[in-house]
Image (spheres, rainbow, N blue to C red):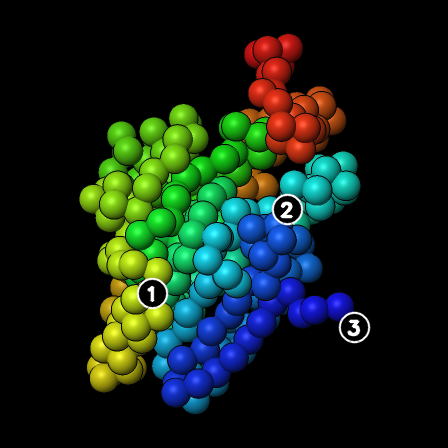
């Protein structure tokens, strides 16, 4: 029997959703995202859950985004274009606090999932960054623009348009992380935050979180598929996405020059 790739556990009023694909640095497939969305919905309505924690298995990675082998294997189109990626939005709409427990690399979709959480608590060896233009992945819409709410426009544009890597201390200074601790202290720090949340009025927390939602509501109406249809409706037929994915898998620099 294959090992379960998304784990779900509830203990002491904390639900933990874990991406259990350490061999891929906890990269996810479309099926994984559907499972994560279902568990998030389950936790949101469970009276025995007051706080939700998102994390990955092991000490190397929180999540490095979509599994490039999966994306390439689907020809790009069914892997990305047809995936109804609502997980970030579900984090925002979830009435309960959501904490990202970042235990290593938080790259690409793994990174923007982390900055959509209410708190991001990282181990001191964690690395943060985006991948979109680097690998030909057409991330767009609110998952990109919300970075400006977190960081301000100049840093958000650097983050998304240059695809640099940032260590945990830089992430803390920029506001991508709320706390950075040694890996040995990560669970303790996450539990401390959970206990603080659990000591507060759940209804008042729900009201506060919904208030932030209404601040974000205008950008939430612009998702990746909207932007893709507006800017590059033929993107998945040009070969540009395939070049990015192939270069990544072949460990070479992509050549996007013919697509300029």
Residue 113 rendering spot, x and y as whole percentages: 45, 53
Where is residue 195? Give x, y as percent: 27, 80
CB-based contact (under 8 Å), mark 2 and mark 1: no
- Disc sitting over residue 114 in the figure: none
Q: Secondary structure at mark 3?
A: loop
Does 135 sit left or right of 188 as displayed? right
Q: Is residue 178 visible?
A: yes
Per the model, the C-alpha gap separating discs 3 and 1 is: 32 Å
Picture layout, residue 209 above or below residue 112: below
Q: Nearer the viewer, residue 106 or 150?
A: 106
Q: Which sits earlier in the primary sequence, circle 2 or circle 1?
A: 2
What kind of element bears circle 1?
helix
| Mark in front: 2 vs 3 | 3
Percent from the top left, x then y, of residue 109?
50, 47
Sequence order check: which comes first, mark 2 or mark 3? 3
Point out the tag, 3 or 1, that comes first from the N-terminus: 3
Q: Callout 1 environment at 10 Å: few (<14), some (14 to 19), or many (20+)?
A: few
* Residue occupying image coordinates x 45% and y 65%: 54
Element marked by disc 2: loop
Where, quadrant-wise, is the C terminus in this rendering?
A: top right
Kindly identify which residue carries mark 3: 1
Q: Which residue is mark 2?
A: 67
Q: Is residue 164 above or below residue 40?
A: above
Q: Nearer the viewer, residue 182 or 211?
A: 182
In this rendering, would 77 be left or right of 103?
A: right
Mark 3 is surrounded, within 10 Å at the Cα level, by few (under 14), some (14 to 19) or many (20 or more) other residues, namely: few
Q: Residue at x 26, y 41 (%)?
A: 170
> How far apart are labels 2 and 3 at the CA level?
21 Å
Measuring 26% from the left and 56% from the top, which residue is drawn there? 180
Q: Specify the quadrant that holds the N terminus.
A: bottom right
How packed is label 2: few (under 14 Cα within 10 Å), some, or many (20 or more)?
Answer: some
- What is the number of the mark on residue 184? 1
């Amino acid at each position: 029997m294959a090992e379960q790739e998304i784990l779900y556990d509830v203990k002491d009023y904390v639900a933990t959703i874990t991406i259990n694909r350490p061999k891929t640095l906890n990269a996810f497939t479309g099926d994984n995202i559907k499972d994560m969305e279902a568990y998030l919905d389950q936790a949101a309505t469970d009276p025995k859950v007051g706080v939700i924690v998102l994390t990955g298995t092991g000490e190397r990675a929180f999540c490095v985004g979509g599994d490039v082998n999966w994306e390439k294997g689907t020809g790009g189109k069914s892997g990305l274009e047809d995936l109804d990626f609502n997980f970030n939005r579900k984090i925002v709409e979830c009435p309960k606090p959501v904490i990202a427990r970042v235990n290593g690399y938080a790259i690409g979709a793994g990174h923007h999932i982390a900055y959509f959480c209410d708190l991001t608590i990282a181990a001191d060896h964690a690395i943060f960054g985006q991948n979109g233009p680097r690998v030909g992945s057409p991330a767009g819409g609110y998952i990109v623009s919300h970075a400006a709410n977190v960081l301000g426009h100049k840093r958000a544009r650097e983050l998304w348009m240059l695809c640099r890597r940032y260590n945990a201390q830089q992430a803390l200074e920029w506001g991508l992380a709320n706390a950075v601790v040694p890996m040995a202290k990560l669970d303790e720090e996450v539990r401390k935050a959970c206990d603080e949340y659990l000591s507060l009025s759940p209804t008042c927390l729900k009201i506060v979180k919904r208030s932030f939602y209404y601040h974000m509501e205008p950008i939430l109406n612009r998702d990746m598929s909207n932007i893709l249809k507006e800017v590059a409706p033929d993107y998945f037929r040009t070969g540009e996405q395939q070049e990015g994915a192939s270069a990544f898998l072949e460990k070479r620099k992509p050549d996007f020059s013919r697509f300029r």
